[in-house]
Amino acid sequence: MYVYADNAATTKMSPTAIQAMTDAIEQYWGNPSSLHTTGQTAKEALEAARAEIAQLLGAESPREIYFTSGGSEADNQAILSAAQFGARKGKKHIISTKFEHHAVLHTLQKLQKQGYEVELLDVHETGIVTPEQVKNALRPDTALVTVMYANNEIGTVQPIREIGAVCREAGVLFHTDAVQAVCHIPVSVREDNIDMLSLSAHKFHGPKGIGVLYARKGILLRNLIEGGAQERGKRAGTENMPAILSMAVAMREEMAQMDAVTAKLTTMRDRLIEGLTKIPHSRLNGDRNQRVPATVNFCFEGIEGEALLLMLDAEGIQASSGSACTSGSLDPSHVLLALGLPHEVAHGSLRLSIDAETTDDEITHILTVVPRVVSYLRNMSPVWEALENGEKEHLI
Amino acid sequence: MALYSEKVMDHFKNPRNVGKMENADGVGEVGNAKCGDIMKMYLKIEDGVIVDAKFNTFGCGSAIATSSMATEMIIGKTVDEALTLSNKAVVEALDGLPANKIHCSVLAEEAVKAAIKDYYDKNGIAYDRELFCDGNCAHCHAHDDE
Ligand SMILES: Cc1ncc(COP(=O)(O)O)c(C=O)c1O
């Protein structure tokens, strides 16, 4: 059996999204900036996609939608724009959280080096930041609050609407990295009090290398890429038409079936949680209920995540981990450490992220194989041995 | 999957000499759970020859594969020969490792040495302390930069 359970990393494009892409290549190959018919035909399709996305996100106007190369670029542009805007008024304090995606964290680090003061809020054992924390951290010189909608590693959902309300009341710009939320849970920039939002098409069965920065009317964006007048002068470069048109189609399709898919995924996800919790000395990372329907993250004491992934891959199960060996550094994932997990425990993590194509049989397969592989690896682990014979104390 | 060579995957999926050993003549443990890898090596030594070796490893795929390969390479060797086992030789025997995994092979070399040191200590055999792991895993991980 072959199970793809790494949809938080990326998804397979849907047939309709692929069709939209090939249609675009054939029919809308003109340059939207050209004045002739071929160019204007492409321009119309481009603007129709923009209008559709604006409507699906609850934006006031298509002019608030800027196409980018993906979530990372949108995060970078949103944060750097808000920082520059704030600095002009002498505001150089930025509030975020400890477990943001690196597209956010590394941008904030860059700003820190330039003299901004960055405050990263605690996310507790639950993996959730509260509106009160944001409220307490706000200062007269706060330029921006940026809090992700749903965490990519553990799947916990943040109280974005309430945080947005706190920021609105204080008159502080609010950005959210909604890459893992859009098309997975209901998101509306209007209802959620969002000023800026990042999304990425490849997380909802659309193409890779395309995303959106939503910026509410009146927000001044700063260019990352200089050149032509595309995207109202805020993002130069001839538009990636096939990807943009495909993204719009994928978004419409995913949102239309979200309720039905959520019901199905939630049942399967809960089976995963129930089954994996039965493994001794395991733990679910992040709040049990306030999470996206598709993602679970577990730690298994006494084993290392990369070995677990390779074993699972050999059994046809493809997942991911936040172990140091998979992060490319000496430290395990900053997300798991932000939850307060000790390094030893964080090394043994497993993220499973399913999608609408996942079947009950596949869940059964996961629940059969994971416990077997965990106990196989534990049997060869000197750490597990020490835990079991009492030389070391179990941490979970 | 092309992340690792076939040899690495073979030794990872079918590790040789995995397990504990009762009445080992030398036992060595190196690494640190905080850093994500620990290797424990057991040696049976008769007349200065390693007649059996076993290992237990907490770590990634390459940590398990290098432990397995290292045991294969030292069984039948004299203790002196085993002391000359280098991490490079283990890596070559595995048809290579990705650059960021070289530290795993250093750990395997250190695990063999730690077990031999334990054997020396138990038997009152004199040795050069310089040859052995000082317990600081940053030293092994520092090899990453190579
Ligand atoms: C939360 C989050 N933000 C940002 C990104 C980056 O998106 P992209 O790959 O489109 O640059 C990702 C995906 O990797 C993500 O999960």
Image (cartoon, helix red, strand yellow):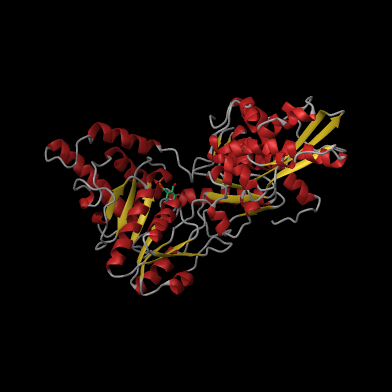
Nearer to us in this view, A21 or B97? B97
Q: Is residue A225 left or right of residue A169?
A: left
Question: Is residue A274 in view?
Answer: no
Query: Could you tell me which quadrant the C terminus of chain A lies in?
Result: bottom right
Asked whether A269 or A243 is in front, the reply is A243
Please say if A243 is above or below A117.
above
Query: Who's the residue at 66% across and 33% down the image?
Result: B66
Q: Position of residue B92 (x, y in %)?
A: 61, 26
Q: Nearer the viewer, residue A155 or B34?
A: B34
The image quarter containing residue A319 is top right
Q: Seen in the image, is A318 located left or right of residue A52?
A: right
| Residue A199, image x, y percentages | 38, 51
Q: Count the numbered circles shown.
A: 0
Residue in view at x 70 percent, y 46 percent: B134
- Residue A24 placed where, x, y %? 27, 36
Is residue A137 or residue A365 the one in the foreground? Answer: A137
Q: Position of residue A219 (x, y in %)?
A: 27, 62
Query: Residue B26, can we see it?
Result: yes
Instruction: Check the image and report above or below for A347 versus A221.
Output: above
Locate residue A124: give its quadrant. bottom right
